[in-house]
Amino acid sequence: MTRKISACIFDMDGVLVHTEMHHFFAWKRLAKTLGFTIDEEFNEKLKGVSRTVCIDLILEHGGIQKTQHEKNKLAEQKNKWFLESVSSINENDVLPGVIDFLQDLRKNSYKMAVGSASKNAPLLLEKMGITSFFDAIIDGNKIQNAKPHPEVFLRAAQELAIDPFECVVFEDAQSGVEAAKTAGMFCVGVGDPVVLFKADVCIQNFVDMNLLKLHQLLDIA
């Protein structure tokens, strides 16, 4: 039996907008200053998790230890490079099909939220002109626990006043999929089903995505 769905929660990076490469280049630049390199395979570990966790993963990868103060400085530097890289992002950078899908959900009175580890989420949503679609924006500034902990999605459901069981999460990262499932939510993976194998179903993108297709996905699962 198809579960009742009342709300959709979206990760941001890689789901609403392609900022992953901006993140990757900034992390790669940071690693280079520390004397080593990271590749795209390693970068998969950095998707969907907090900046603090990313710093720890990178330092562990390079076999380097830093004080908390030094880690904070590294995180600030990475974020500075990232913001420089995305300074020109605008409405044209919203991924294909996303706005049509958001409009379809809004027209049918579905609640919507963003659940992202990024502390830059409000800024980027504003630059893309899509903030008004969302009834709640839960970002890295509002949570204590990074994905795969379910806090970000449970907090979103709480602010929407919707039972987690009635929420669908759209995620492109393994950690985010795990967080959604732990929260008791239906999860649509956006991207490679081999990578996102824990998702209930997967889509490649939001092109031709609509409410009817969403319910078809729920039936398939």
Image: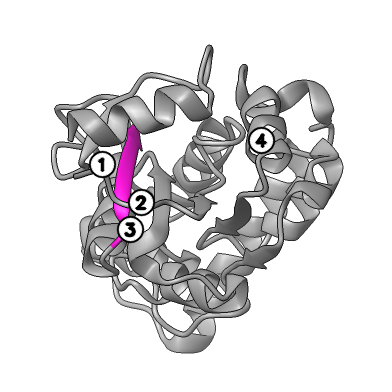
The Cα–Cα distance between marks 3 and 2, rounded to whole angstroms, is 9 Å
- Please name whichever residue, 151 or 5, is drawn nearer the observer in this view of the structure: 5
Q: Are marks 3 and 2 in contact (CB under 8 Å)?
A: yes
Circle 3 residue = 58
Farthest residue to the front: give it.
1
Circle 1 residue = 42
In the rendered image, residue 144 lying in the magenta stretch gets the answer no
Q: Residue placed at 53% from the left, 13% from the top? A: 207
The x, y position of residue 74, in whole percent, is 54, 67
The Cα–Cα distance between marks 3 and 4, rounded to whole angstroms, is 35 Å
The tag earlier along the polypeptide, 3 or 2, is: 2
In the rendered image, residue 186 lying in the magenta stretch gets the answer yes
Q: Amino acid at mark 4?
A: Leu
Q: Which mark is residue 46?
A: 2
The Cα–Cα distance between marks 1 and 2, rounded to whole angstroms, is 7 Å
Circle 4 residue = 102
The tag earlier along the polypeptide, 3 or 4, is: 3
Circle 4 — which element? helix
Q: Residue placed at 79% from the left, 21% from the top? A: 92
The x, y position of residue 123, in whole percent, is 79, 55
Q: Is most of the magenta stretch helix, strand or loop?
A: strand
Tell me: 220 left or right of 166.
Answer: left
**In front: mark 1 or mark 4?**
4
**In front: mark 4 or mark 2?**
4
**In front: mark 3 or mark 2?**
2
The tag earlier along the polypeptide, 1 or 3, is: 1
Q: Are marks 1 and 2 in contact (CB under 8 Å)?
A: yes
Q: Residue placed at 65% from the left, 40% from the top? A: 108
Look at the image and give the residue range highlighted in magenta: 185-190
